[in-house]
Amino acid sequence: MNAAPVLVGYTAAVGFVAPQLILRARWPHRAPALAAAVWYALAVSFSIGAALSAYNLAMPTEHLHAGLVGLLHSCGLDMGASAGAGAGTPDPGTAERLAAGVPGAFAVALLAGFAFHVTRARRARTEHRQALDLVGRHSARLSATVLPYDVPAAYCLPGRRPRIVVSDAAVRELTPDQLGAVLEHEQAHIAGRHHLLLAAVEAFHSVFHRLPLARHAREQTALLLEMIADDRALRSHSHEVLATAMYEMAAARAPKGALAAGGHTVLIRMKRILGPRKAPHPALWGSVAAVALAVPLLPLLVACPPGLG
């Protein structure tokens, strides 16, 4: 049985239909970490589905199913046993090369895109750190670099040598509680290695840039990571304190490779912080978490259905 039609249909649904369902749902902003996990799960599932679809379209041969060996055969990871399958089957050598090449091309493209975005952001942060060493001053009290700038702003430079940067206008105009909430927000970005998560969705978007899933995953993940950092700050500061600090820094912009508490997502996040806060029902949380774990495996189950001999 050739699984190509089912795989193509599933992959298309993940790439085009699933993003619209998530965008219309209300729960993602109430559980941003879970929502981000769902976007990543969909991206992984689409990548696997696209690779297996291409393989099955190129090699519509009979699949073997016999335990783990059969699973590897049916996934195209070991085609050696197809030798001697008959005159009507493709050449085993060609089949093996295509089986490794088609999924491998997707993997190489995604890994190369991830490496590119990580390297480019790291280079931008290195250059910015050098500029900060010249014009900024370290504040031991804030554990941050204070930058001469007449607009309240705060951002972090994550990576191996993380650094939090605040403008002297922010130090002057924000209250100690507001400044503390902002610093906690930036520390959450560093501790969560959010720059790597952003690089991953950027890589997915680079490979599948015309895909709605890729476009929305990049936009929504950036917003959700800011919400995750907001929630970290809310553990030790009030909603009003964080919201007013964000309002003061709404006009600020971060340099390339940095993550900022302000920016164009401030209004959405302020509405979330100041509005009614209702945690997702445990049943909904558990169901969505189960879906996020299962979705990446679905293309493999379609391509390699268990129990077939």
Image: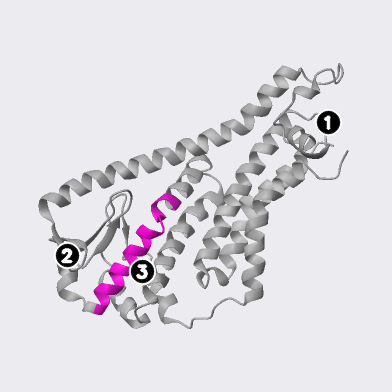
Q: How is the image coloured?
A: one colour
Image location (x, y in percent) of residue 59: 75, 28
Which element is circle 2 on? loop
Between 143 and 83, the one lying in front of the other is 143
Mark toward the start of the polypeptide (1 vs 2): 1
Tell me: residue 226, above or below residue 65: below
Residue 219 within the magenta-colored segment of the rendering: no
Image location (x, y in percent) of residue 218: 47, 53
Residue 154 visible, this orientation = yes
Image location (x, y in percent) of residue 2: 81, 36
Residue bearing mark 1: 62
Which element is circle 3 on? helix
Which segment did they paint magenta?
Answer: 177-197
Tell me: residue 199, above or below residue 82: below
Q: Mark 1 is on which residue type? A: Glu
Q: Mark 2 is on which residue type? A: Ala
Residue 195 within the magenta-colored segment of the rendering: yes
Residue bearing mark 3: 266
- Do labels 1 and 2 touch, CB within 8 Å? no
Mark toward the start of the polypeptide (2 vs 3): 2
In the image: residue 169, left or right of residue 37: left
In the image: residue 43, left or right of residue 13: left
In the image: residue 199, left or right of residue 61: left
Which label was assigned to residue 189? none
Whole-number angstrom distance, CA of label 1 to CA of label 2: 67 Å
